[in-house]
Amino acid sequence: MDTHRRAIQSFYEEHRRMPSYSEMATLFGFKSKNAVAKLVNKLIDGGLVTKDAQGRIIPSRALNEVPLLGLVEAGIPTSVDAELSDTLDINAYLVEDRARSYILEVKGDSMIEEGIREGDLVIAEKGVTAKDGDIVIAEVDGGWTMKYLRTKKDGSVYLEPANSAYKPIYPKYDLTIAAIVKGVIRKY
Amino acid sequence: MDTHRRAIQSFYEEHRRMPSYSEMATLFGFKSKNAVAKLVNKLIDGGLVTKDAQGRIIPSRALNEVPLLGLVEAGIPTSVDAELSDTLDINAYLVEDRARSYILEVKGDSMIEEGIREGDLVIAEKGVTAKDGDIVIAEVDGGWTMKYLRTKKDGSVYLEPANSAYKPIYPKYDLTIAAIVKGVIRKY
DNA sequence: TTGCATGGTGAACGAACGTTCACTATACTG
DNA sequence: CAGTATAGTGAACGTTCGTTCACCATGCAA
């Protein structure tokens, strides 16, 4: 029954939709849709897929997700029964409101002490009010940067890099906070 | 027509499948499926959705993706015509082979100089041969760690942290490389 | 041996699917 | 003004959908 799970997964990844009952029949080698129907009920009990109101099967969360196995100190369990553990949808985890989210590629090393390096991608969300300490994408005096947003006691704000080699930026004319950084992505 | 795009997107996010023609009719306020059919053809021309062999519409890549707007120095364009630019599917970007990928949460600061901090999530891929310089998840002398894999001239290997406060680990008895780190995720 | 789950076949059902055609109303163009 | 796209209505089409029923084969328990 895990082979069925895998067949559905690969179909879903290839077609970006769930297979119909007759497609599953050919997928599993069945000649009758009824065999599929019985199997699907078990898959639903197993939590792999779900049905919506129209009776079509839709992917359960697990289909898009990656197993989350715990802390790195615990390593990677060798047993196959890792099915019980958590899974994570990276997209949903990082992007809360996709209509307001954008990805920017990081240039420079001004946030290096925050662990954000050149070439990383940051997920920026527009339209949220930035708080003190947030990492913001801001236009200051005509140029764009990514920095910490800091508020002074008198209420004025400035931008502070996470790199002791650079100095804070006190806006002379203009400071527009376009978005705040919600996440960082790095690929090796 | 961008409002249509948004309606489809929210339907897709809620139901995890594409709407049927009649569902789109109610979704858009149409009373005829034909109006939807004509609209869908335009959406296909616009690259928002695609049809498969059975005539059902499937999400084009753009539906799962987040706009990729360029370098952080360029900031966020204010114009709405950002539709032309690139988009990125974070899941597909980070996870190449989902059957072999796992997520681990980082504990400790041994990779801090690589920009990997406690609480970050790393995407680890099993079953690939690690090269010199890769960041690996390894079991050494009974404990699990994440370190650089280094190869000496004599062919022997050791593990090097990205933290000058820690010393390299020369395996005494056993070194098992379980996976290599393919990506890092941080959420604020 | 009988009895009974289990797992599959095959056919039929109504409902929903995407497609198509003829038609109407609105709006823009010359 | 006439002419023509454009956008939507409404109904009909053949197909496929998920569901259901009766039936058959195998294997296990009593």
Image (cartoon, coloured by chain):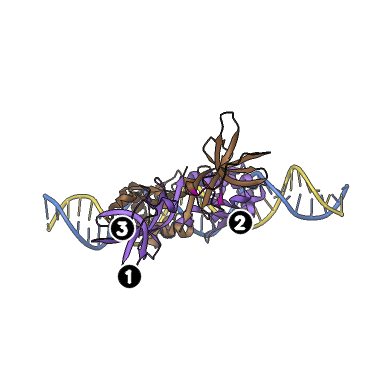
Chain colours: A brown, B purple, C yellow, D blue
Q: Residue at x 59, y 29 (%)?
A: A155
Tell which subunit mark 1 falls on. B
- Foreground mark, 3 or 2, reads 3
A108 in magenta = yes
Residue A102 in the image, given as x and y percentages of width and height: 57, 48
**Residue situated in front as seen by the camera: A58 or A186:** A186
- Label 2 secondary element: loop
**Which amino acid type is shown beneath numbered disc 3?**
Ile
Q: What amino acid type is highlighted by mark number 2? A: Gly
Q: Secondary structure at mark 1?
A: loop
Where in the figure is residue A186, as x and y percent of width and height? Answer: 47, 54
Q: Which residue lies under the disc numbered 1?
A: B155
Q: Earlier in the sequence, mark 3 or mark 2?
A: 2
User: Disc 3 versus disc 2: distance between alpha carbons?
Assistant: 52 Å
**Sequence-wise first label, 1 or 2:** 2
Q: Classify mark 1: residues with Cα within 10 Å, few (<14), some (14-19) or many (20+).
A: few
| Residue B159 position (above or below residue A161) | below
Residue B179 picture quarter? bottom left
Residue that badge 2 annotates: B47
Q: Which residues are magenta?
A: A101-112
Q: Does the magenta run of residues contain A83?
A: no
Q: Kindly indicate whether the residues beneath marks 3 and 1 are on one polypeptide chain.
A: yes
Determine the chain carrying the residue at label 3: B
Same chain, labels 1 and 2: yes
Q: How many marks?
A: 3
